[in-house]
Amino acid sequence: MKSSNIIAGIDIGSSKVAFVIGKINEGLIEVLAVSSAQNSGLKKGIVNDIEDCLSSISSALEQAEKKAGAPIDKAVIGVGGAHIITTLSKGIIAISKPNGQIDPSDVKRVIEAARAVALPPNQEIIHVIPRQFIVDGQSGVKDPLGMTGIRLEAEVMIIGGSTNALRNLEKCVSQSGLSVNNFVFNGLGGSNTLLNKKQKEVGVLLLDIGASTTTLTVWEDGDLVHANILAIGSNHVTNDIAIGLKTSLEVAEQVKIQFAGCKLGESLKTKIDLKKIDPREDQKVERELIDEICEARMKEIFDHAREELKKIQKDGMLPAGVVLSGGGSLVRGAVALAKDELHLPVQMGYPVLEISGEIELLDQPQFHTATGLMLEGLDDSYQNKNTFSFNFGSLNTRDLNSYLGKIKGFFKQLLP
Ligand SMILES: Nc1ncnc2c1ncn2[C@@H]1O[C@H](COP(=O)(O)OP(=O)(O)OP(=O)(O)O)[C@@H](O)[C@H]1O
Ligand SMILES: [Mg+2]
């Protein structure tokens, strides 16, 4: 028997596949299982080996089903990678009703008009996220429902991705026996888990330093104002250490995880005996050298992030600062270095949600995105049961519904 109210959030990352399985239990989010498996089927966040990716998904799925004690049939799939694009678009419609009152069908029509944007060839829309509505020239309207007017405009952010990349991801997932509930941009998944309402209101950057990509998601006034994926991640630190120490990638990875740091200000004359990591090694390496290599690459990542903030005139201007996520942020000293480079308050990301069940692993960065993806799926089932009678067709209902505030209070985000 399939358990249709159970949903999986799956983060198919360049280093691992992470599953978070949950359901709504008496109005609260309950996590039933968390699992992960190494993944080598992606390059720069894009599937480049379907077999490898499928085998990672299958392995994490098997563990998750065993832990949950129930079969899983549908999943929200995270999308990241260098193929993601964002663009702003605008739609305009006339309100045709005699009383001029804006109803859900008008909102749907104006969003449809805004989504009619020419994307580059072989790209398709993943999200249409309304930023503001304009009613008869009055801008800054967050919820136009019930207002009266003759002209309704919508400004939306469109997040798109390569059709081929999405189909390959879909193939991996469906071959594992799961059906794709929907695709969700990884940055939105992570934001669901790690950012509270106040941070999104005053301005915040979520910086997810993954294995081969770094995902930026910037929020202000409660809206997503910028998103980008940089083709640089923590594997670059590993690669630099391998080259710098003339050692294997496996040893370099262990050196990074166990010893590397940035901005530590410690006495670094101690030597690391690589033999302890791999008996075939015969070098002793100064910590100072390891940290120099690590710091240079981490600095480059933060410098790129700062460039992104400059592009949107937010350099040094986000009062809620930077929230770090992704395995790459675990390198020691990352927070201090990010503060120096970005000139903003910086903190490690921790889930801001009230969740019950199997929560022990959820504060580990590799599960932050998958948790938020799962929430998107629960969000849908919650809406179907509780709130919505109208259908947004091909739109991602979550974007519109959450924008309109229809699910207020569903995510019990904890304000600081
Ligand atoms: N304790 C640690 N210290 C430093 N780096 C770490 C640590 N733990 C994990 N990492 C690094 O984090 C990276 C994996 O992070 P994450 O799971 O967020 O990536 P991913 O989601 O698979 O990749 P991507 O988002 O780029 O597709 C790897 O490069 C790994 O070496
Ligand atoms: Mg990732």
Image: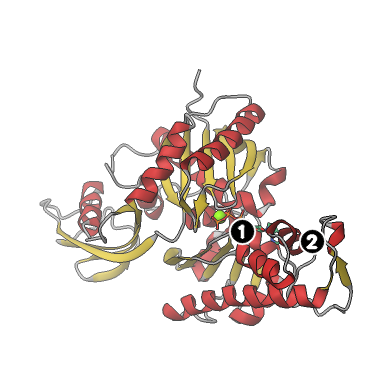
> What residue is shown with label 1?
326
User: Percent x, y for residue 79?
Assistant: 45, 51
Is residue 28 visible to us here? no
Nearer the camera: disc 1 or disc 2: 2
**Left or right, 379 with reference to 358:** left
Toward which corner of the image does residue 138 lie, by quadrant?
bottom left
Q: Is residue 195 above or below residue 390?
A: below
Q: Are marks 1 and 2 in contact (CB under 8 Å)?
A: no
Q: Residue at x 70, y 73 (%)?
A: 244
Give, as a three-letter code, the residue at label 2: Gln
Coloring basis for residues: secondary structure
Name the image quarter holding residue 181: top left
Q: Say whether mark 2 is within 8 Å of ligand 1.
A: no
Q: Is any atom of residue 360 visible in this view? A: yes
Residue that carries the numbered disc 2 in the rendered image: 258
Q: Quadrant of ligand 1?
A: bottom right
Label 1, label 2: how far apart the Cα atoms are: 17 Å
**Residue 198: x, y in percent?**
55, 64
